[in-house]
């Protein structure tokens, strides 16, 4: 993990809103449902999958990620499941700076982790 990253020559930036373990559900009031309720590992993976989808839509890849911010209601749980992220980012050949913050609650009480990211190309 890097403490800082020097970035030069970028022309496009992508700022992510917080990505969580949601999948589409047209029958629900919000149009989404929580994936992996009560399962931090599953939610971690689902949030990273959502980041992959947004990167692809923007014509970017994991190696374009400049920084990440993890918000969780269970810091110890994230640390115990950090391999989910480490394996996901290893393919990109980068280790962007990260911040991990413990919070009392996320937008829905079923959510255990939220990930913000910034990418540039």
Image (cartoon, helix red, strand yellow):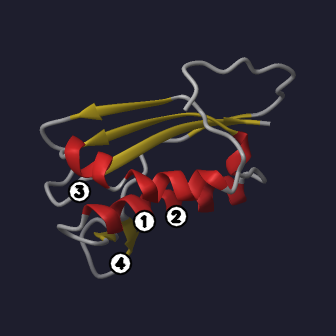
Identify the residue at image location x=49%, y=57%.
48
Q: Element at badge 1?
A: helix
Q: Are the residues at dot 1 and dot 2 in contact (C-beta closer than 8 Å)?
A: yes
Which sits earlier in the primary sequence, circle 3 or circle 1? 1
Work out how far the residue at label 3 is from the one at label 4, CA to CA, in angstroms: 16 Å
Q: Element at badge 4?
A: loop
| Residue where numbered disc 2 is placed | 49
Q: Are the residues at dot 2 and dot 4 in contact (C-beta closer than 8 Å)?
A: no
Which sits earlier in the primary sequence, circle 1 or circle 4? 4
| Residue where numbered disc 1 is placed | 46
Image position, residue 104 (x, y; %): 12, 38
User: For mark 2, does the 10 Å Cα neighbourhood hold few (<14), some (14 to 19), or many (20 or more) residues?
Assistant: some
Q: Residue 37 or 97: which is nearer the viewer?
A: 97
- Which disc number belongs to residue 25? 4
Image position, residue 10 (x, y; %): 82, 26
Quadrant in the picture for the N terminus: top right
Identify the residue at image location x=72%, y=17%.
6
């Amino acid at each position: 993990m890097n403490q800082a990253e020097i970035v030069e020559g970028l022309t496009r930036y992508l700022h992510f809103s917080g990505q969580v373990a949601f999948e589409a559900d047209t029958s629900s009031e919000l149009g989404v449902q929580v994936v992996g309720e009560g399962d931090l590992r599953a939610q971690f993976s689902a949030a990273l999958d959502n980041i992959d989808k947004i990167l692809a839509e923007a014509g970017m890849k994991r190696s374009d990620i400049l920084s990440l911010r993890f918000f969780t209601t269970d810091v110890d749980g994230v640390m115990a499941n950090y391999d989910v992220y480490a394996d996901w980012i290893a393919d990109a050949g980068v280790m962007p700076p990260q911040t991990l913050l413990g919070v009392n609650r996320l937008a829905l009480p079923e959510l255990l982790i939220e990930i913000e990211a910034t990418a540039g190309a």
